[in-house]
Image: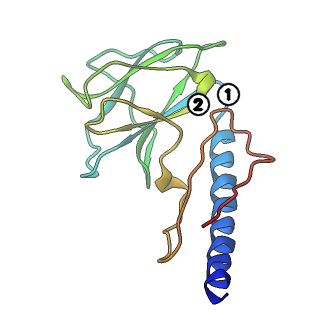
Amino acid sequence: MRGGVHFQAHMKRLATFLTVALSAAAAAQTSLPADTARVHYQRADGAYTGWGLHVWEDTTATVEWSKPLAQTGVDAGGAYWDVPLKAGAAKVGFIVHRGDEKDPGPDFFADPSKGNEVTVTSGKAEFAYGAPAALSDPPVPAGVARINYYRPDGKYDGWGLHAWE
């Protein structure tokens, strides 16, 4: 029975961490204005100097290749840009680059209806919808599992987790 009590204690901690993580994720999704998309950029080396964002399609930003959108900021999740959107935006093209060096390389297209934040990871051929986990996730204590769950619509009310051995 002692193992069951130990397991229940871990599950209680897991439920607490999930509640905090889901609340933080929901808050992150609602913190941007509806007419803004945020592009996060993560590099393992943490070197963001000189990297800019080229954007086109459903944005009101005016950029040239030689004068990309300047970084809005750098935080625990890396560099990020806030991109102003046209009304009814459905497709936003973007490329992270420094001069003629693209990272990771391909042209990306995001659909704001799937989420107003995306994360580009250096060297990865695909981007992900949502903010980097580093922005909302506290360190995971030893003996605890973290499960992250993302909903593009940002609606987490009524969702829970069932865990068993």
* Quadrant of the drawing holding the N terminus: bottom right
* Vertical side of 81 occupied by 137: above or below: below
Say which residue appears at 49% left-offset and 52% top-offset. 133
Image height of 20 relative to 92, above or below: below
Query: Residue 7 or 130: which is nearer the viewer?
Result: 7
Q: Residue at x 49, y 68 (%)?
A: 139
Residue beneath disc 1: 34
Q: Do the residues labelled 1 and 2 touch (CB within 8 Å)?
A: yes
Quadrant assignment, res 96: top left
Q: Is residue 152 left or right of residue 105?
A: right
Residue annotated with mark 2: 116
- In the rendered image, residue 143, in percent from the top left (x then y), is placed at 50, 77
Q: Nearer the viewer, residue 12 or 68?
A: 12
Left or right placement of residue 64 versus residue 23 in this view: left
Give the residue type at disc 1: Ala
What percent of the width, then of the height, locates residue 123?
A: 25, 37
Which scheme is used to colour this image of the protein? rainbow
* Residue 114 picture quarter: top right
If you read the primary sequence from the N terminus, does the residue marked by circle 1 or circle 2 appear first? Answer: 1
* Numbered disc in front, either 1 or 2: 2
Q: Is residue 152 left or right of residue 44?
A: right
Q: Is residue 39 above or below residue 144?
A: above
- Where residue 97 appears, as percent x and y from the top left, is 27, 28
Amino acid type, residue under disc 2 in the picture: Asn
Residue at 30% x, 35% y is: 124
